[in-house]
Image (cartoon, rainbow, N blue to C red):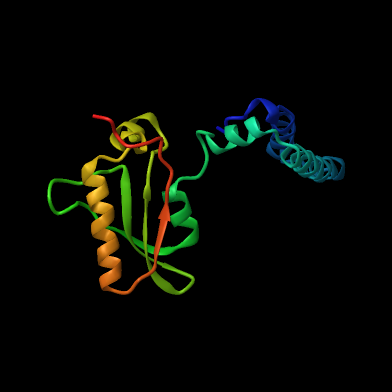
């Protein structure tokens, strides 16, 4: 279920109304017209809200718990992502993911912070806070990309380094 920020409340109400109309599976013309009209109204309100955001609202969006992560971007932007593990010295930091993928027909190296979606996954990934082995892993992957003459796309999304 989507989490809404305080300034997105009008969107929530409209989306719930549209979902209720769609769920009814009614074939009546009036219901179909209501769905189309509500969808257009939703787009207009969304455009209006996001065109006039305050600096704090921009920060809220940037910190939204359901914003896309590197795995979401890789899933939608690339093909054939093959994750590589370990720093070849100590271990594998799950807060950093990286590997080869194909983007726009070209082989690339993608590296980034992964925070996780659920609490269990966030704990496994240390909430996206890399440890020393994560930095060594990223460096190893960058050197590997250099060796194979592949461009590197990085996704930086971290609250900071692990202090422990």
Q: Name the residue rendered at 31%, 42% in the picture.
A: 95
Q: Name the residue rendered at 63%, 36% in the picture.
A: 58
- Relative to residue 51, is residue 92 drawn left or right? left
Q: Name the residue rendered at 52%, 40% in the picture.
A: 67
Horizontal and vertical percent position of residue 44 = 80, 43
Horizontal and vertical percent position of residue 2 = 57, 33
Of residue 14 and residue 115, the one placed in the foreground of this image is 115
Determine the image quadrant of residue 116: top left
* Quadrant (top left/top right/bottom left/bottom right) for the C terminus: top left
- Identify the residue at the far right of this view: 30
Q: In the image, is residue 103 above or below residue 56?
A: below
Determine the image quadrant of residue 28: top right
Number of marks in the rendered image? 0
- Identify the residue at the far left of this view: 89
Of residue 159 and residue 100, the one placed in the foreground of this image is 159
Horizontal and vertical percent position of residue 17 = 74, 32
Horizontal and vertical percent position of residue 26 = 76, 40
Determine the image quadrant of residue 121: top left
Q: Name the residue rendered at 35%, 71% in the picture.
A: 150
* Quadrant (top left/top right/bottom left/bottom right) for the N terminus: top right
């Amino acid at each position: 279920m989507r989490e809404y920020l305080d300034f997105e409340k009008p969107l929530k109400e409209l989306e719930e109304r549209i979902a209720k109309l769609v769920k009814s599976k009614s074939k009546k013309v009036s219901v179909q017209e209501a769905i189309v009209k509500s969808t257009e109204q939703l787009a207009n309100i969304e455009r209006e809200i996001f065109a006039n955001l305050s600096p704090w609202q921009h920060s809220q969006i940037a910190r939204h718990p359901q914003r896309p992560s590197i795995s979401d971007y890789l899933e939608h932007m690339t093909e054939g992502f093959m994750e590589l593990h370990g720093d070849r010295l100590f271990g594998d930091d799950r807060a950093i993911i990286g590997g080869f993928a194909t983007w726009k027909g070209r082989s690339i190296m993608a590296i980034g912070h992964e925070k996780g979606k659920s609490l269990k996954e966030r704990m496994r990934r240390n909430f996206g806070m890399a440890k020393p082995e994560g930095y060594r892993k990223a460096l190893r992957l960058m050197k590997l990309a250099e060796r194979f003459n592949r461009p590197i796309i990085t996704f930086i999304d971290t609250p900071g380094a692990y202090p422990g």
